[in-house]
C-alpha cells in the first residue's frame, strides 16, 4: 500500500460501488463540517488504473465531503491487493460499521469535557449535533447502570420518562430497580444490578411505572376516588400539608404507584351504575369503547347517554367522558365488512326531471324575476313587507352572522324562529305588533357593539343606537372598574367636565367622580355615548367613496393602456421589415446618423426619429457632459472634438417617462 496526497476532484467513482442509493446531502454537509474541524481521520482506499488515474474502492462519501469542504488536497491509500477483493472491501466497510451507543457517546462527551476541557460548542460542532442533543446525553450521567444498559439495547425510556428518572437520586433509582426485578433474579443475586437479557426481546421495563415511582409529585386525597379502606389496602400513606389552605382536605402522597393502584381498584370495584370503563389508547388518551360514541359539547344530551371513566396516566386522576351507545344501524355500518353484498339490490336511481345545469339556469331566471318584482314595488311597498323581506334575507344561506355568543348546535336560531312565526304556512302574517316583536328580536341577535373583528357589527350598530336613542338606556358608568380604564390625562379631563377640582393622582380623581355622581346618580362620559358614531360613520363613508374613485381611476388607466397597446400593435412591422430593421416609415441608418447636437444647433423642432425639442436638447446636454467627463479640458481640442463625435455616433440616449 502507498499513501498519496491528491486532489479529491480527480478521483474517479467506482462503477461497482455497492451503495447505489442517492447520497444524503445533509449528512454529507455535516461530515464536511466535521472534516473542517478535526480533519480527515481515515483516508479513502483507491486503486490505480492502467492510465494512471485513481478510482475509489471505499470512501466515496469522504471524497464528497472533502469537495464540499473545499479541500484541494487529501490523503488516499493506494491499494495493491487483488482487484477481485475490491467489491468485498467496499461492501464490508458499510455493513460491518456500527454506531456508538448512547452511553458510549455520553462517556466520550463527558471525557472531552473533563479531561480535554472542550466546550459544548466545540463538541457540538465536532459531532455535528445540536446543543439539545448534548443536553439529552447529559441526562445519562445520573442514571443507574442497568438503565444505561437498557438504553444501549434500544429498550430505554422515552424522553419525558427519562427526564423524571434522571432527576431522581441514583440510590432511589437503584431501590426502585431492585423492587421491580426482585423476583427475576436468583436467590444470591442483587436485583438492583439486574440487566435486561439482550437475547430476550420480551424482557422490557415499564418505564412509566418507574418514572411514576420516582417522580416527586404530590397526589392529593381530594382528587382520589377511593376511600380510606381502599387506600390502606393499596399501601397509600397520606401526609398532611401543613401549609395548605385551612378548612380543606390537604392530605397528599408522593407514592404514585400506590395511588395509581388504588385508583385502578376503584375503577374495578366501585364504578357507578351505568358507567363504562375506558382504557388508555394511543398517545395516552382515552380510547372510545366499541359500540359507543363520544358526546361532544355541541351535541344535545339524550337519555341513553352514559359516563365513561378512565385513569389519566399523566395526572393519575379519573377523568369522565360522556358516551352515547351507537344505534343498531351505526353498529352494523361499523362492523359489517365492505365485501359483503347487501341483502337486497337497490333499484337504480331515477333521473331528475331537470338536470343540475337546468336548475342553475332557473336560479338565474328566478333572481332576475325577483329583482324585477322588487323594482316594481320600490315606490309604494308596504314598510312592514320590507321588514319581513329583510328578515328573510338575513336568514338566507348566503348570509353569515358572527355573534359573541355561540348558538346551540342543532337548535333553531332567532332568525329562523322569527321566520317560523311570521311565515307559518309560507304566507306573511300581517300583524304589525308581531312584526315589530320579531324584527327587534332578530336585530338584537345580529347587531352588537362588541370590539371584535370577527363578531362585532362595527359602526353600523352604533348608528343603530343613535337611530333608536340608545344613549337614554346607558347605565351609570361611574364605577371603579370602568374608571380604571382611563389614562391619567383622560380621568382628569373627565373630572374637569364635571367641574371637579384637580387631584394629585388618577385614583383620587376616580374616587372624586364616584363620590360626586353617587350610587343613585347617572354619569355617562362623552366617549362612552353613541354620539361619536356619527363622525366614525362619516369617515367610513368617505373611505368607501375614496376606494370607489380609486378603483374607477385604475380601470380608466387600464383601459387607456389597452388602447395604447392596440395603437402600437397597429404599427408593428412585418417579419421581413423587422429582420431588415427598415419599414415603410422607418429611416435607414444614414438618416439615423443625424446628430442630436446638430439638431439642437439647427433649432429644429423634431429629430429624424420624431422626438420633440425637449428630448433633443436633453440628448445634447447629456452627450456634452459625457464628453467633459471622458476628455479633460487640457487635452488637445482636436482630440476633444474627435471624442465627442465618437460619443455622438455611438451613444443612444433614451428618455423614459415616469
Image (tube, helix red, strand yellow):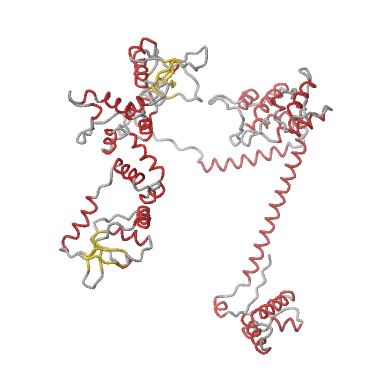
Q: Is residue 323 something one can see in this rendering?
A: no
* Rendering quarter of residue 211: top left
In the displayed image of the protein, which residue is found farthest to the right?
499
Compared to 54, does 225 lie above or below? Answer: above
Image mark count: 0
Residue name at image x 70 percent, y 53 percent: 552
Which of these two is toward me, 577 or 640?
A: 640
Which of these two is toward me, 540 or 227?
A: 227
Question: What is the quadrant of the C terminus in the image?
Answer: bottom right
* Rendering quarter of residue 325: top left
Which of these two is toward me, 546 or 390?
A: 546
Residue name at image x 63 percent, y 86 percent: 590
Which of these two is toward me, 331 or 191?
A: 191
In the displayed image of the protein, which residue is found farthest to the top?
229
Q: How far across and down, in percent of the image, does residue 370 sit?
A: 65, 38
Question: What is the quadrant of the N terminus in the image?
Answer: bottom left
* Rendering quarter of residue 51: bottom left
Q: How far across and down, in percent of the image, does residue 331 sit?
A: 36, 25
Compared to 585, does 405 lie above or below? Answer: above
From the viewer's perspective, tell me whether residue 284 is left or right of residue 404: left
Q: Is residue 83 something one can see in this rendering?
A: yes
Q: How far across and down, in percent of the image, does residue 143 sit?
A: 32, 34
Q: How far across and down, in percent of the image, does residue 494 sit?
A: 78, 30
From the viewer's perspective, tell me whether residue 230 is left or right of residue 519: left
Amino acid at each position: 500500500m502507498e499513501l498519496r496526497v491528491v486532489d479529491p476532484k480527480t478521483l474517479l467513482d467506482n462503477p461497482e460501488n455497492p451503495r447505489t442509493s442517492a447520497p444524503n446531502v445533509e449528512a454529507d454537509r455535516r461530515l464536511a463540517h466535521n472534516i473542517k474541524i478535526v480533519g480527515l481521520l481515515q483516508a479513502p482506499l483507491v486503486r490505480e488504473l492502467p492510465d494512471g488515474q485513481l478510482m475509489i474502492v471505499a470512501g466515496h462519501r469522504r471524497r464528497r465531503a472533502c469537495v464540499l469542504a473545499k479541500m484541494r488536497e487529501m490523503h488516499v491509500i493506494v491499494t495493491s491487493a487483488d482487484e477481485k477483493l475490491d467489491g468485498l472491501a467496499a461492501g464490508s466497510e458499510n455493513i460491518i460499521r456500527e454506531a456508538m451507543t448512547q452511553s458510549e457517546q455520553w462517556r466520550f462527551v463527558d471525557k472531552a469535557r473533563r479531561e480535554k476541557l472542550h466546550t459544548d460548542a466545540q463538541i457540538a460542532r465536532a459531532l455535528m449535533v445540536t446543543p439539545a442533543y448534548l443536553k439529552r446525553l447529559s441526562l445519562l450521567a445520573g442514571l443507574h447502570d442497568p438503565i444505561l444498559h437498557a438504553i444501549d439495547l434500544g429498550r430505554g425510556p422515552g424522553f419525558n420518562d427519562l427526564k423524571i428518572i434522571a432527576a431522581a437520586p441514583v440510590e432511589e433509582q437503584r431501590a426502585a430497580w431492585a423492587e421491580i426485578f426482585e423476583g427475576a433474579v436468583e436467590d444470591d443475586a442483587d436485583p438492583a444490578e439486574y440487566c435486561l437479557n439482550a437475547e430476550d426481546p420480551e424482557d422490557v421495563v415499564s418505564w412509566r411505572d418507574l418514572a411514576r415511582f420516582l417522580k416527586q409529585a404530590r397526589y392529593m386525597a381530594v382528587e382520589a376516588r377511593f376511600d380510606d379502606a381502599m387506600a390502606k389496602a393499596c399501601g397509600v400513606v397520606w401526609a398532611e400539608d401543613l401549609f395548605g389552605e385551612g378548612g380543606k382536605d390537604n392530605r397528599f402522597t408522593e407514592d404514585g404507584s400506590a395511588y395509581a393502584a388504588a385508583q385502578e381498584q376503584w375503577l374495578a370495584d366501585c364504578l357507578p351504575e351505568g358507567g363504562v370503563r375506558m382504557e388508555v389508547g394511543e398517545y395516552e388518551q382515552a380510547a372510545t369503547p366499541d359500540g359507543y360514541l363520544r358526546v361532544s359539547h355541541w351535541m344535545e344530551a339524550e337519555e341513553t347517554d352514559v359516563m365513561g371513566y378512565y385513569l389519566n396516566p399523566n395526572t393519575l386522576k379519573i377523568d369522565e367522558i360522556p358516551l352515547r351507545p351507537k344505534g343498531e344501524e351505526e353498529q352494523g355500518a361499523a362492523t359489517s365488512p365492505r365485501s359483503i353484498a347487501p341483502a337486497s339490490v337497490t333499484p337504480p336511481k331515477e333521473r331528475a326531471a331537470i338536470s343540475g345545469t337546468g336548475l342553475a339556469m332557473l336560479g338565474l331566471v328566478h333572481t332576475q324575476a325577483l329583482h324585477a318584482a322588487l323594482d316594481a314595488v320600490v315606490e309604494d311597498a308596504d314598510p312592514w313587507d320590507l321588514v319581513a323581506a329583510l328578515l328573510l334575507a338575513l336568514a338566507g344561506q348566503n348570509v353569515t352572522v358572527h355573534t359573541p355568543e355561540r348558538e346551540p348546535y342543532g337548535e333553531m336560531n332567532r332568525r329562523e324562529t322569527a321566520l317560523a312565526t311570521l311565515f307559518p304556512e309560507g304566507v306573511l302574517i300581517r300583524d304589525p305588533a308581531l312584526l315589530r316583536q320579531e324584527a327587534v328580536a332578530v336585530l338584537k341577535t345580529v347587531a352588537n357593539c362588541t370590539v371584535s373583528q370577527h363578531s362585532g357589527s362595527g359602526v353600523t350598530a352604533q348608528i343603530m343606537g343613535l337611530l333608536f336613542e340608545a344613549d337614554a338606556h346607558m347605565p351609570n358608568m361611574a364605577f371603579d372598574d370602568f374608571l380604571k380604564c382611563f389614562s391619567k390625562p383622560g380621568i382628569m379631563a373627565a373630572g374637569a367636565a364635571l367641574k371637579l377640582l384637580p387631584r394629585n393622582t388618577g385614583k383620587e380623581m376616580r374616587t372624586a367622580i364616584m363620590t360626586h355622581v353617587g350610587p343613585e346618580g347617572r354619569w355617562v362620559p362623552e366617549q362612552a355615548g353613541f354620539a361619536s358614531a356619527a363622525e366614525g360613520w362619516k369617515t367610513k363613508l368617505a373611505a368607501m367613496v375614496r376606494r370607489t374613485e380609486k378603483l374607477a381611476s385604475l380601470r380608466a388607466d387600464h383601459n387607456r393602456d389597452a388602447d395604447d397597446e392596440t395603437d402600437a400593435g397597429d404599427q408593428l412591422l412585418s417579419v421581413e421589415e423587422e429582420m431588415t430593421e427598415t419599414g415603410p416609415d422607418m429611416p435607414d441608418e444614414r438618416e439615423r446618423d443625424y446628430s442630436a447636437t446638430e439638431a439642437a444647433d439647427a433649432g429644429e423642432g423634431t429629430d429624424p426619429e420624431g422626438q420633440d425639442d425637449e428630448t433633443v436638447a436633453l440628448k445634447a446636454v447629456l452627450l456634452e457632459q459625457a464628453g467633459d467627463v471622458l476628455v479633460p479640458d487640457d487635452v488637445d481640442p482636436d482630440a476633444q472634438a474627435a471624442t465627442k463625435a465618437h460619443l455622438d455616433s455611438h451613444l443612444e440616449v433614451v428618455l423614459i417617462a415616469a
